[in-house]
Image: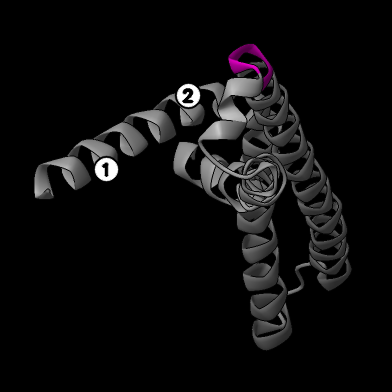
Amino acid sequence: MPWAMDARKKAATAWLRQQSKIGRRAASGAVIFNIVGTLLAILQAVAAADLLRALIVHDGQPVLLAAIVFAVAAIARALVMAAADAAAFSAGAAGRRRLRSETLVRLLSIGPSLLRQGHSAHFTGIVVDRIEALDGFFARWVPPRWL
């Protein structure tokens, strides 16, 4: 039966690829916020280097300007990263909502004959527990993979 496991593994991989493509649209906000956060981190590093240079060399360059740029970049980066987390959570929630709906429609289309194949608690577990477990996939894996 190794061929059966390979077929299931291939089907699961194809399904995850399909879900990843669908999830990219929802995760685009998180990706954009992460790109902006990265640019702000670079600005923050440049400001920190300039601040350290001004403190060490004492060449008359304004220390206050470098400190202000560093502080503004740090605050802006924190806000942008919080927005990225919120966008990633929204993408995960949208993905789970879509999957629950698709699964429920499929289960209802099969009808009562499905209960002959297994207990209703098992199918409830699929709809609730296993789909909720995909939160990390949509919220934490799809955006960085796309980046």
Tell me which corner region of the image, top left, top right, bottom left or bottom right, holds residue 106.
top right
Q: Is residue 38 visible?
A: no
Asked whether residue 108 is drawn in magenta, I would say: yes
Tell me which corner region of the image, top left, top right, bottom left or bottom right, holds residue 98.
top right
Asked whether residue 45 is drawn in magenta, I would say: no
Q: Which residue is labeled 1 in the image?
A: 9
Look at the image and give the residue range highlighted in magenta: 107-111
In the foreground, 18 or 38: 18
- In this view, the residue farthest toward the bottom is 56
Give amino acid for label 1: Lys
In the foreground, 83 or 123: 123
In x, y percent, where is residue 138?
61, 41
Determine the secondary structure under disc 1. Answer: helix
- In this view, the residue farthest toward the top is 109
Which residue is rendered at x = 53% and y = 48% of the image?
141
* Mark 2 vs mark 1, CA separation in Å: 18 Å
Classify 10 Å Cα crowding around label 1: few (below 14), some (14-19), many (20 and above): few
Determine the secondary structure under disc 2. Answer: helix
Which residue is rendered at x = 79% and y = 56% of the image?
73
In the foreground, 23 or 62: 23
Q: Which residue is labeled 2 in the image?
A: 21
In x, y percent, where is residue 15?
40, 30
Which residue is rendered at x = 82% and y = 72% of the image?
63
Give amino acid for label 2: Lys
Left or right side of 68 for 110:
left
Magenta segment's dominant SS is: helix
In x, y percent, where is residue 6?
17, 43
Disc 2 or disc 1, which is closer to the eye? 1
In x, y percent, where is residue 140?
60, 51
Q: Is residue 45 visible?
A: yes
Left or right side of 7 for 64:
right
